[in-house]
Image (tube, grey):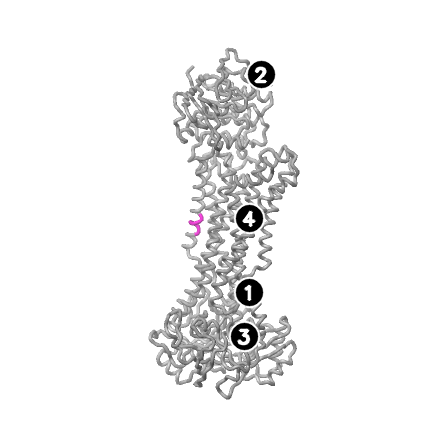
Amino acid sequence: MKEIVELKNVSKVYKIGDTEYKALDNISLSLKEGEMIVILGPSGAGKSTLLNLIGGMDTPTNGNVIIDGEDISKYNENKLSEYRAENVGFIFQFYNILPSLTVKENVDLVKDIVKNPISTEEALKGVGLLKHSKKFPSQLSGGEQQRVSIARAIAKNPKLLLCDEPTGALDSDTGVEVLKLLRKQCDGNNGSNTVIIVTHNVLIADIADTVINVKNGKIESVITNQNPKKIEEVKW
Amino acid sequence: MLNRKIIRDIWKNKSQFITIFLMVFLAVFAFAGVHAYMDGMRESSRIYYENQNLQDIWLTSKNFTNDKLEEIKKIDNVKNVERLFTINANVINPERFINPDTNKELSDLVLECNFIETNEINKIYVMEGEKYSKDTKGLWLDYYLAKKIGINVGDELELSIEGTNFKEKVVGLVEVPDHVYFIKDDTAIFPTHTDYGFCYLSINEFPKDLYVFPYAIVDVDNDSSVDETRDKIKEKVEGIITATLRDDNFSYEGYKREAEEGETYSGVFSGLFVFIAILSVVTTMNRFVKKERTQIGTLKALGIKRNRIVRMYVNYGFFISVIASVLGIILGNLLIGKFFLEMEMEYYEIPSYDIATIPLVYYVAIGIVLVITLVTYLSCIRILKEPAATALRIERPKVKVRENSFTTKKLFNKLSLSTKWNIRDIIRSKGRTMMAIVGIAGCTMLVVTAFGMLDSMKSYVSWEFDVINNFKYKLSLSSDYTDAQYNEIISKYGDSTSQTMGVEFKHNDEVIIKPLTINDTKGLLQVTDHHRKTFTMKDDGIYITEKMSSMYNLKVGDMVEWHVVGSNNWYKTKIVGVNRDPQAQQFNCTKKFFDTLNEEYKPDNIYTNEDLSNIKEIHGVNTIQTVNNLKDSMNSMLNMMYSLIALLIGVSVILAVVIIYNLGIMSFSEKEYQFATLKVLGFKYKHIKEIFIKQNVWIGIFAVIIALPLGNFMTDYIFKNAIGDSYDFEAMIKPITFIFSGIGTFVVVYIVNQLLAKKIKKIDMVSSLKGNE
């Protein structure tokens, strides 16, 4: 499998007043296409920052972020928007779906900016929410709302699915269902989709193809999981 | 700790709080300012009239003898009565004095001389010099005139009354309560204080041996029954020609009308300022509190007492509106009030005047604070009533997608994303949309109305001076012109003449006094119909002006019973037509008709198109006026009104910009999270900007469309209902005014939203989304 994500000497420094805070400290990393990757680490380790840089939501202070051969750290705002639209699906811990739009409308949104989206019905069917398509997010449970967020992400048919604590607000059973959907996405498209999950839940690491441990803004280890666990076996 | 939150929240939402402050401030500033000068005018005159004991009744007769005065004094409710003799005198050698307006020597200086005995009623207010005494020689001169042309106490003036010359020393410079609004004659329109003034002298100073007292003034004990007293005097005292009350007095009524006219239209305006500002501020506070929902939920969940939370949120609106209201009252009084009062008082002779703040202004300011506080309180209580767990979550939209909803139709799906987004948003946030429409439409309406008033006033001046006054010169004849003088004048300048006289007509059980103009001007003084088109009057009856016709429910075909004031011949005449006049509500008839009555026609005005530019004096003529001068005089008088309208336009425009900016910033802050999500999804800046701007542009266009006719309606309302009874004109707004007001508002909406849209670029996706979590 080819490398889909490559980070070279990437640093991210935040300035809060006169103090500088180093979220990522000169890290380099390669991730392969078609894998399910889990980034593990305690709060404040730099996991989300890493995910945001890969997703083009933020730009590095130093270094290069190369996605599928393109250095996105050189992109301007517009190119980054195009990159996010065409290549990346995001899933957040608190779903970030739009409360004033129905389930269907939330998923429909992406059709206007993506060249080859999958149909809204297919995306909703994939997450088992077709029958709720006319409901508003507030009428759904947390797990269902997260599934809307997944449907919206996969409707873009993205190369990269980036998930920031996708099960963080869910109970174990619902979390497992969500992970199944993420695995399904990873296996789709002839196995060329890549899913990156940021979590502090070490149990989720067992289902990953690759596990990256981050601590104090540095990569502590990159472990390839030869025998990932079946998702049904995970419980927390 | 919560105080720190208040300070930080205010800092974080500073733009919104600044706009709230500005809206309240502007509304109170305009309301208090306009009231300060209007009420100042009214209050200053009230005190002046009271202190100087302005007469309650004016009487005329051939001569008020001592016996007649005693007779009047015996009538119930009459407290005191005094008599006087008023006659015009020419000042000899007027060229001694310079007209400061033109910097030329005066060619003519006329003094209205009031010869009096005692001075307990209509008391002279001495600005400089001696107090009035019957035994003092000399004259007490009009202070305004003296100051304008440089006459001082101690100066001597030589006067001429009907060919008798006499010299008097100026012993005092004075103001008198029944000479507050004092002009040369009714064609002069506004006081110049240059070639005409008044003076008071003891009757002992009258230069001839024989004199009569044709005027008397009456002071009553009880003002509320002054009508009955007037009627009793007319009934019991023989030889009374006229008996009029304060409202019929030229000075009293002229001053009062000026204060009331401004009061009504600026009252409508400042009322609207307050209404629109309150609406916008309470909406903003309501939306602000709703935005704070999860924080309120968190505070509740933390166990902070309900009252403390409520107090914290109520404080935002309370303190801002209190500070804005207090500043609005202070600055409104000092800036608007003082400025306009000073400007207005250039024309009126009142010795001391000051702005006044009536309780209503404080009530309005307190009302604004209370409404804002109450709405904030209710918004907060609504959230606090929910369980903490529910309040911690974003509010569930109160909408349902219906099967037959437009948003589920295929056609809808073919629309662009921004269009779909905004249609949904409008449908699902009806209240918010409605408030935005009302806010923008209200401001546009104010702008249209303010400009519309300006247009309408100009249109009124044009109607009066370009259509009705179809002459170049108007010669006001002196009251004592001779036949020879008259014949010479008409032989030189033509016989287009008119006479205006007072007539009394019966209406129900009342006798009402109104002017009648006998028009023999051969078309130089036109009469116009409802549509301002000129027409020729018929000779078989009298005409009534349209407004008077509706005031007294008199129609064409009705019979009117009337008589000329001072004559005992009563007539029953048919109303044969209705004419419309913008500034004089009265009867009109032709000379041919008037000749059929048993009355003498004695013209008081002659109109001509001859060139009189080189003529300075005509024997038998008091004043020579060009129509352009009349128009200029009217425009000068209206300048005050124009200044006030300019102020209203200014406040309307600023309020409009603030409200539009506030709506934009609220809309942006509420959608920031949604825009951050769209940004994450890969929507480009231009897409998000289109979504943001489109809705506000739609709302702007819709609001403008409904505001234009509303502005027309409001202007019409002001002119039809708010101006004095003597005026009759409606809104005449130029199309260009509508276009400019509409486009102007739209441009403001567009620019404000374009500027706010730049903030989309600055949205930090990570912190925005995290903030929302």
Residue A108 position (above or below residue B153): above
Name the residue tied to disc 4: B279
Q: Quadrant of residue B773?
A: top right
- Secondary structure, mark 1, is helix
Up-down relation of residue B391 to residue B542 (above or below): above
Q: Position of residue A149 (x, y in %)?
A: 52, 27
Of the residues shown, which amino acid type is indicated by label 1?
Arg
Q: Quadrant of residue B155?
A: bottom left
Residue kind at label 3, given as amino acid type: Ile
Q: Which residues are magenta?
A: B741-745
> Helix, strand or loop at disc 4?
helix
The tag earlier along the polypeptide, 3 or 1, is: 1
Q: Nearer the viewer, mark 1 or mark 2?
A: 1
Label 1: chain letter: B
Q: Which residue is mark 1?
A: B42
Dot 3 falls on a residue whose secondary structure is loop
State whether the magenta stretch is mostly helix, strand or loop. Answer: helix
Kindly identify which residue carries mark 3: B124
